[in-house]
Image: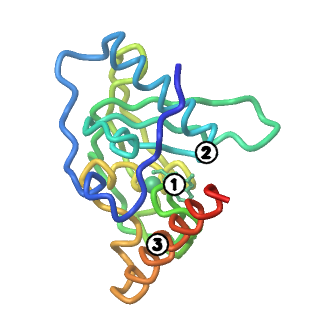
Amino acid sequence: MAIREILTVPDPRLKQVSKPVEGGVTDEIRALMDDMLETMYDAPGIGLAAIQIGVPLRVIVMDLAREGEEPQPRYFVNPEIVETIEETKPYEEGCLSVPDIFDQVERPARCRIRYLDYDGNQVDEWAEDLYAVCIQHEMDHLEGTLFIDYLSRLKRDRAIDKVKKAKIRAIREDAN
Ligand code: GNR
Ligand code: NI
């Protein structure tokens, strides 16, 4: 297992549409998911899409357990949202690819998802609460969409500028 570098805006790779995994959940895909989970825990974050470490495949990992709780790693290969309810809910979102920026995003409150798990078994289930927020946020990454794309252009441009400036500052401090 290895911790990989997380891409941040405005890296153009984050805008790519990720490709479906062909040939099922192989050991190679499991190794990718192991690296993603380790990278996510290290960050730390509650979800991670493969494109965030530069791999344009439809693979997601997640763990919604709170600090002190037993870890609950979840793995999603070729996930699809097959149904959503009309009711929407706002949630204060953040993203490891847009570090230290948080804002409200409104999304369907529940969605039904279908995916292959770590063992390659197909799962079909409803997601609600934080699970619904996070899976929709991660599915957006697979389409090259970030949560800041739902904000006004002014807010989005400011967010990207802040991340760019923080990166420059970090590099400077590293040199000292
Ligand atoms: O760690 C994360 N927290 C979070 C908080 C609210 C809504 C979505 C998320 S996902 C984010 C990790 C991430 O960037 N996943 O793509
Ligand atoms: Ni994200």
Label 3 CB less than 8 angstroms from ligand 1: yes
Q: Observer-nearest residue: 83 or 21?
A: 21
Amino acid, disc 1: Leu
Which residue corresponds to mark 3? 105
Q: Residue at x 44, y 83 (%)?
A: 158
Q: Residues within 10 Å of mark 3 (few under 14, many from 20)?
A: some
26 on left or right of 52: left
Seen from this angle, which residue lies furthest bottom?
Answer: 154
User: Label 1 vs label 3: CA separation?
Assistant: 16 Å
Where in the figure is residue 58, as x and y percent of width and height? 28, 37
Give me the disc on residue 96: 1
Secondary structure of residue under mark 3: strand
Q: Is residue 131 positioned above or below 39 on the image?
A: below
Q: Quadrant of residue 102?
A: bottom right
- The residue lying at 40 percent from left, 24 percent from top is 32
Residue 18 spot, x, y in % from top left = 22, 43
User: Alpha-carbon neighbours of circle 2 within 10 Å: few (<14), some, or many (≥20)?
Assistant: few
Question: Marks 3 and 2, Cα distance to the nearest angstrom?
Answer: 22 Å
Dot 2 corresponds to which residue? Answer: 43
Q: Amino acid at mark 3?
A: Val
| Quadrant location of the C terminus in the rendered image | bottom right
Three-letter code for the amino acid on which mark 2 is drawn: Ala
